[in-house]
Amino acid sequence: MASILYVGHATTSIELDGVRLLTDPLLRTHVGHLKRLVPLGEAPAPPDAVLVSHLHGDHLDLPSLRRLGQRTRLLVPRGGGGLLRRQGFLGVEELSEGETAYVSGVEIKAVPALHDGRRYPFGKQIAALGYAVAGSRTLYFAGDTDFFEEMSELAGLDAVLLPIAGWGARLGPGHLDPAGAAEALRVLRPRLAIPIHWGTYAPWHWRLTRHETSSQEPESAFADAAALVAPDVEVRIVRPGEHTEF
């Protein structure tokens, strides 16, 4: 049995075979012009490793990482380690697509993501990653990505964590919206899908994170779209602060 705590945005705490993994930690109530819409609650338990998908400020947040400790093991896209080492982090490991790390027997494989992964505003081009996690259960954390057909190479996992929205009114290139995330399920064919990257942050003057052209909240729109294109996949809505097992 494995469990997932959806902390919010792209931050999840995954427990698998006695190993705790934390994805893209964003553990603040305010981030620049963004305000958290739901209470942060207690900080996740200390992780055995952190999976960082790319270098954008809402996925690689230095204050949040400092809360975890400078010696925390950080798996990051190749080329991104220098930034963290300059900030005093000691447990940095860089991975390229296809490379694998192990955390107490749990396999962490870096997989492609279709997203601009550089550090803004002046960072060099660095690839974004997703991560395929394998132990007694298998899991795909997509980070931030658009749809690409090669997702089919990850088909048949137990669970996937797919981004479905963002923090603004519109999504630019390199992101999955509810319909795109449902299309990803068509090729991924997991047993369970949990939407992430929704309902957590918004500009301080907004009340909701939602697309201007949509009459549905993104999680409901995703569930409806998935029921049409991937009806055999269980879609489980886990709200920020909630956890589930699979």
Image (cartoon, rainbow, N blue to C red):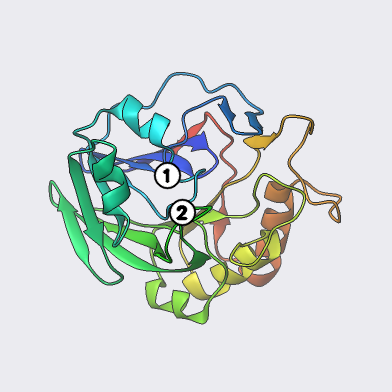
Q: Is residue 122 something one can see in this rendering?
A: yes
**What residue did someone put label 2 on?**
119
Which one is earlier in the sequence, the residue at label 1 or at label 2?
1
**Which quadrant does the N terminus fall into?**
top left
Q: Nearer the viewer, residue 38 or 76?
A: 76
Residue 5 placed where, x, y %? Answer: 44, 35
Q: Nearer the viewer, residue 229 or 219?
A: 219
Residue 32 placed where, x, y %? Answer: 60, 33
SS for dot 1: loop
Determine the residue positioned at 66% across, 28% down. Answer: 37
Numbered tag placed on residue 60 in the rendering: 1
Vertical comparison of 213 with 46: above or below: below
> What amino acid does circle 2 point to?
Arg
Vertical comparison of 111 with 10: above or below: below
| Contact, mark 1 vs mark 2 (Cβ under 8 Å) | yes
Classed neighbour count for the residue bearing mark 1: other residues with Cα under 10 Å, few (<14), some (14–19), many (≥20): many
> What amino acid does circle 1 point to?
Leu
Determine the residue positioned at 56% across, 66% down. Answer: 232
Hey, which quadrant is residue 72 in on the image? top left
Structural distance between the alpha carbons of marks 1 and 2: 9 Å
Residue 121 placed where, x, y %? Answer: 53, 53
Number of marks in picture: 2
Residue 197 placed where, x, y %? Answer: 57, 47
Tell whether 27 sits left or right of 181. left
Circle 1 or circle 2, nearest the eye: 2
The single residue placed furthest to the front in the displayed view is 122
Q: Is residue 137 something one can see in this rendering?
A: no
Vertical comparison of 212 with 188: above or below: above
